[in-house]
Image: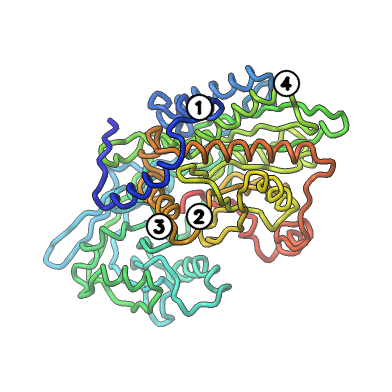
Amino acid sequence: MHARTIPRCFCATLLLSVAITAQTPRKPDAATAAWWAQTVALSNDSMEGRDTGTEAYESAAKYVADQFKAAGLKPAGDNGTFFQRVPMHQIALDNDKSSIEILGPGGKSNTLHFTTDVTTVPREQPSLIEAPLVFTGYGLPPADLDLKGKIAVFFNNTPADLAPADRESYASRRLRALTQAGVAAILSIDNPAATEPFHWPAAYARGVTIAGAPAPNTNAPILIRLNPTSLNALFAASGHNPSDIVTIGGKEAPLVTFPLNQSARIRLTSTSKDISSPNILAILPGSDPKLAPEFVALSAHLDGYGYGTPILGDNLYNGTLDDAAYVALLTELAKNLQHKAPARSLLFCIFAGEEKGLLGSAYFTQHLTVPKENIVADLNLDQLRPIFPLNILTMEGLTDSTLGDTVRTVAAQFKIEIRPDLEPERNLFRRADNYNFVRIGVPIASFIFGYDKGSPEEVIYRDWYARRYHKPQDDIKTPIDWDAASKFNRFYTALALAIANAPARPQWLPSSPYSPHQRAAQSSTSPALYSPQRNSP
């Protein structure tokens, strides 16, 4: 099942990886070995990728709960258990009954396949659409262009001449304009030159929501993503070269509008069912009677993608670094602290449904099992890749609260430089479970292994995202820098203890857009600031 063919184009990257890791121990120390053993237990093939709503996830959740129980933690879930069950509704595209057929001149036709050529978030009802195709540049159509009843195709980027504020709002303005123009459907060509491009093929086309949540706007056009390497059939009768479109669009240069001189027949059929998966919640009671009622939340997500579209012959998305390794870190931390609790209590939060849209953390923060005002901080574990030496950490939330100063003080002990996020366009702050804590007013910290631009470490980092992120290749065979892993695990433990033992709780900085004052001022004018974001770009 686990074929591991390495393309030649990555040889240079692998040589750089060897050069870096050759300077670090080939074997982990005892504590790091114990952490990795837990990681393997949670992400080997028998755990089947821990997809939300599956028996495999249930098995993984029971395993984690048993680890917390063995460490002496107290249940913090529902009805005196470690579990808080999250009710969800799933809509899955039926790939065998769904297709996009490109209808060209002379009766020629070509088919775009889910989920290698195209993907979408499916809707409840079957859809059948047949309409002419029009390329609309970056998507905002000219006022005199008649798009009613047609399928709009655009390149998913923004033109270079936009002001920053217009750039941030471009996607919403584009969708609004196309909806008002009466398009029958929207095809969005992914930008391979983006800082973090979409990872084709998609694992599957599936949408999951918290049960009872408002249904998506069914009046909006169906939005379908296009793999930029699968455009030849779409542009075959247009007189335009699709590779030129992708190159020009990637540079944000002007793109013209033109008819594609073809139609598309879109068939979408989905199945739906109610599912559920549990969050795992546990408490290590604090040792100081005055501070013990307060909690430092330590969070990670247990779910992965499970089985999906095969890549290099492998269809099991194990999710080793995303995020089994950091659930494992929390189970190990619980064991190590069971006889030396800090002053404040530690609230261990292992969330379900993160990959489906931060669902487990959203449900928890809407159905808290401890008082909201008693949660002083959340230290979230996600987006961490210990695959090169750890000298730099990017911190999400660095300038939002006093946690930034605490993090810098603790990091200095480990000779780690703390930097702000230098790639805000990736939206990592809102793409992880920490964001739902922000939404209820809790200061947060989360981390990404950092690097200098153009360094060998950046090459390794980008390569991991290209070949392993949200793919079956994120598995226990990933090369790990054991020194980096150990260093981060020790840093995170020291940080959790520093916050839990500090006399004063963390405070929002007045300048932060997430501070209570700023939030009250902006919530009515910037609702998107506080709306949940889907995790995958």
The residue to which callout 2 is attached is 451
How far separated are the C-alphas under marks 1 and 2?
Answer: 25 Å
Farthest residue toward the front? 23
Q: Nearer the viewer, mark 1 or mark 3?
A: 1
Asked whether the viewer can see residue 185, the reply is: no
SS class of the residue under badge 4? loop
The residue to which callout 3 is attached is 197
Check disc 2 and give the amino acid type. Tyr
How far separated are the C-alphas under marks 1 and 3?
Answer: 33 Å
Q: Residue at x 26, y 68 (%)?
A: 243
Q: Nearer the viewer, residue 185 or 340?
A: 340
Considering only order in the chain, which callout, 4 or 1, is on the residue closer to the N terminus? 1
Considering only order in the chain, which callout, 2 or 1, is on the residue closer to the N terminus? 1
The residue to which callout 1 is attached is 33
Q: Nearer the viewer, residue 65 or 111?
A: 65
Check disc 3 and give the amino acid type. Pro
Check disc 4 and give the amino acid type. His
Check disc 1 and give the amino acid type. Ala
How far separated are the C-alphas under marks 3 and 4?
Answer: 45 Å
The residue to which callout 4 is attached is 339
How far separated are the C-alphas under marks 2 and 4?
Answer: 37 Å
Q: Residue at x 39, y 35 (%)?
A: 475
Q: Nearer the viewer, mark 1 or mark 4?
A: 1
Q: Residues within 10 Å of mark 3 (few under 14, many from 20)?
A: some
Considering only order in the chain, which callout, 3 or 2, is on the residue closer to the N terminus? 3
Farthest residue toward the right? 290
